[in-house]
Image (cartoon, rainbow, N blue to C red):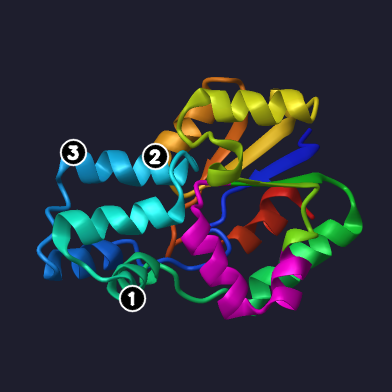
Amino acid sequence: MIKNIIFDFGDIFINLDKPATNKFLTKFGVDINDDELTAVQLTYEKGQISTEEFIRFFKQKYSIQKEDVLGAWNSILLDFPTYRLDFLTELAAVKKHRLFLLSNTNELHINWVKESWGLPLFELFKNCFEKFYLSHEINLRKPDQSIFTFVLEENNLNPTETLFIDDVLVNTEAAEKLGIQVWNLIPGKEDVVDLRSKLKI
C-alpha cells in the first residue's frame, strides 16, 4: 500500500523545453559537450558554487553577458498547467498520503519560478508538500542514491510504501534499487494527474 509519494518537479508539474538551453548556449559558441561545462552545471545544481560564480564561468570562458546567461539558462522553463495544481491541492487536502517534492533544481531556476508564478502561487504549491527538497539546498542530486537514502531516513519512510515519480529513467532506476516503487512518467504520453486512476484516489 502506498503511503508516501515523492514527486519530481520538472515535466511532472512544470512543463520543460529540455533542448532549449543547449540551443541558446550553442548560439553563443558554447560547446555543450565540454566536460568543464558539465562539471560546472552539476556543481551548481548541487549548490556547491554560487549563482555569481556560475554566471562568472560563462562570462570568463565564453564572454557571455549575465542577461544572456539568464535568458539561455531559464529558457528550459515553461508553463505550470492549473489543472495539475488543482490535482495536487486536492491530493494534499485529502491527507491520505505524505507528499514530498524532490527535484534537481538550481537557484536561478527556482528564482525564475517564484518571479514568474508570483509568491502566493509558489507558496500554495510548496505548502502542498510535507518537505520540499531542492538539490542546491541539500547539496545532493539525483540519480545519486544518497539523495533517496537521505529523504527516506529523514522522514522515516518505508521504501516499499513509497512511490517516486520522475520523468528521467536513470532517476527512477536508482530509486527502484532501494526498494522504492517508481513511476517513470513519459511527458506527452502520461500526466501526473493519471495518478488518480493508478492509486484509485
Which of discs 2 and 1 lies nearer the camera? The answer is: 1
Which of discs 1 and 3 lies nearer the camera? The answer is: 1
Dot 1 or dot 3: first in sequence order is 3
Q: Secondary structure at mark 3?
A: helix
- Residue at numbered disc 1: 67
| Image quadrant where residue 38 sits | top left
Mark 1: which amino acid?
Glu
Dot 2 or dot 1: first in sequence order is 2
Q: Position of residue 76 (x, y in %)?
A: 38, 67
- Residue at numbered disc 3: 35
Alpha-carbon distance for marks 1 and 3?
24 Å
For the point 48% across and 68% down, which residue is it? 15
Q: Quadrant of the C terminus?
A: bottom right
Question: In the figure, is residue 16 to the left or right of 83?
Answer: left
Residue 112 inside the magenta-drawn segment: yes
For the point 64% across and 63% down, which residue is it? 193
Q: Secondary structure at mark 2?
A: helix
Query: Is residue 10 something that shows in the picture?
Result: no
Q: Main secondary structure of the magenta part?
A: helix
Dot 3 or dot 2: first in sequence order is 3
Question: In the figure, is residue 162 to the left or right of 17?
Answer: right
Task: Pick the residue in front: 66 or 129.
Answer: 66
Task: Pick the residue in front: 17 or 27.
Answer: 27
Question: In the figure, is residue 108 to the left or right of 134?
Answer: left
Q: Position of residue 40 (x, y in %)?
A: 31, 43
Point out which mark residue 43 bears: 2
Q: Quadrant of the N terminus?
A: top right
Range of the magenta residues? Answer: 103-125
Residues marked 2 and 1 touching at CB (< 8 Å): no
Mark 3: which amino acid?
Asp
Q: Residues within 10 Å of mark 2 (few under 14, many from 20)?
A: some
